[in-house]
Image (cartoon, rainbow, N blue to C red):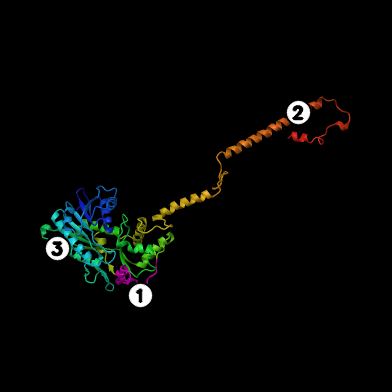
Amino acid sequence: MEGATETTRVLVTGASGYIATHIIQQLQQAGYQVRATLRSLEDAAKAEKLRALCPEAAHALELVEADLTKPESWEPAVKDVTYVIHAASPFPMTPPKDESEIVTPAVDGTQAILKACVQAKSVKKVVMTSSSVAVRYGSSEPNKTYTEEDWMEPEGLDAHGKSKVMAEKAAWDYVKELPDEDKVELAVVNPSYVMGPVLNGSKCSSTDVVKRLLEHSSLCVPKLNFSIVDVRDVAAAHIKAMTSQEASGKRHLVTNDNMWMKEIAQVLSKEFKSQGYSVPTANYPNAVLNLIGMFDKSVKMIIPQVNKVIKFDNSRMKEVLGVTPRDLKETILDMAYSLIEAGIVKKSKKYRGPGGIQADKEEEVDKKEEGDDKPKENGDLKEGEEKKEGDETKEDEKKEADEKKEEKEGEEKKEEKEEKDNKEEEKPAEKTEESKPTEESNPDDTKDGE
């Protein structure tokens, strides 16, 4: 498979999605021409954020309109495209009233994109974003690690789970039935629970766990276990699957390791407690969680997963795609900081920022303010003691004038003494002792002599 060239154009569907933004950014950083789809181009602010994902890109991001519910919109979208990364998929924040609202556009939209790729004649491969849910979800067999060979049946799954399973199966079935002259290669990426930094401040369901923990949305945390992967690793896996011949015709579980929600909370608490965030780290008793689920639909959605652990094999991710998973602590903290920086989670007064940058700035300000409060050296005044302009100069002039006055008075007295002494010498000397002046009888002599 060819890498990035001047003529290699990649289409990414669902451009504003959490995973898609990272795929676009990494593709542009690698030098690809990228075209991306939005359901509407009317939101100028959203489009501008996407164009700013990679400011140094050799090729500007091209945005086009295309909708999973509008099959006719995909033919112009895939024109002159070499690869398609199909990341668009509906994901509900709360259960829909009718599951067909999620399942139908996921399945029909995938088939419409594949049909358009066949008609375009330029598309060599489609990489589809599926999910580990299509491999296994819910209960797990004891001591079993699930691989790409495992398939989850859609029965019993929620709308999102069904949409993932059915859309992926529809993609494999469609490609399988293509005649040889119309063959388009297909590779599928099945990420587990995706975490890591959000780009452009885009809100998505993947941020829900960290957001709730930082905002202390509940007193405790449910006993949920997550198989986690970093969004940056997921994006890299899509690009590797796109260019790797060995990835063609295969599924790829993309995951790192498992963590309990309590463990995620502990990582966050250790980092953010001193920054003014109170993160709950105790588990809910099951009975209490069930009671809350009666009134909160979002809680009701996760109750079936309480105390369940599912492990996945990520051998193909590491060996075929060559993606080494990031440390999960880095993944969690990078996501948390990105949510705060984007304003999705409110900044606390003690917030220091990534790497303590904000704390350093505040410390400099504090030191400056503290220094202003201290008495300064060299006769300066403390803050609050006003010193009028020119006061210091006036004091110096007054002191100099006083010194000159004293010096003049001393000279005058000295002259008076000398004149007096001369007159005394001109008088006839007296013979009696009583008429002689003495030092003791004229104390001014001592004073004048100073």
**On the picture, is 336 further left or further right than 12?**
right
- Quarter containing the C terminus: top right
Q: Is residue 211 above or below residue 401?
A: below
Residue at the spot of label 1: 287
Q: How far apart are the alpha carbons under marks 3 and 1?
A: 48 Å
Q: Amino acid at mark 1?
A: Ala
- Quarter containing the N terminus: bottom left
Residue nearer the viewer, 112 or 26: 112
Q: Determine the secondary structure under disc 3.
A: helix
Q: Does any portion of residue 365 appear in the rendered image?
A: yes
Q: Residue 262: where, in percent of width, then height?
A: 37, 67
Sooner in the amino-acid sequence: mark 1 or mark 2: 1
Residue nearer the viewer, 318 or 379: 379
Sooner in the amino-acid sequence: mark 2 or mark 3: 3
Task: Check residue 418 in the rendering and tell me which mark sits there, or answer none.
Answer: 2
Q: Residue 355: where, in percent of width, then height?
A: 40, 55
Tell me the residue at 68%/34% (across/down): 406
Foreground disc of the pair 1, 2 = 1
Residue nearer the viewer, 26 or 303: 303
Span of residues in magenta: 280-308
**On the picture, is 100 further left or further right than 264?**
left
Q: How far apart are the alpha carbons under marks 2 and 3?
A: 132 Å
Q: Count the labels in the image.
A: 3
Q: Is residue 409 above or below residue 214?
A: above
Residue at the spot of label 3: 176
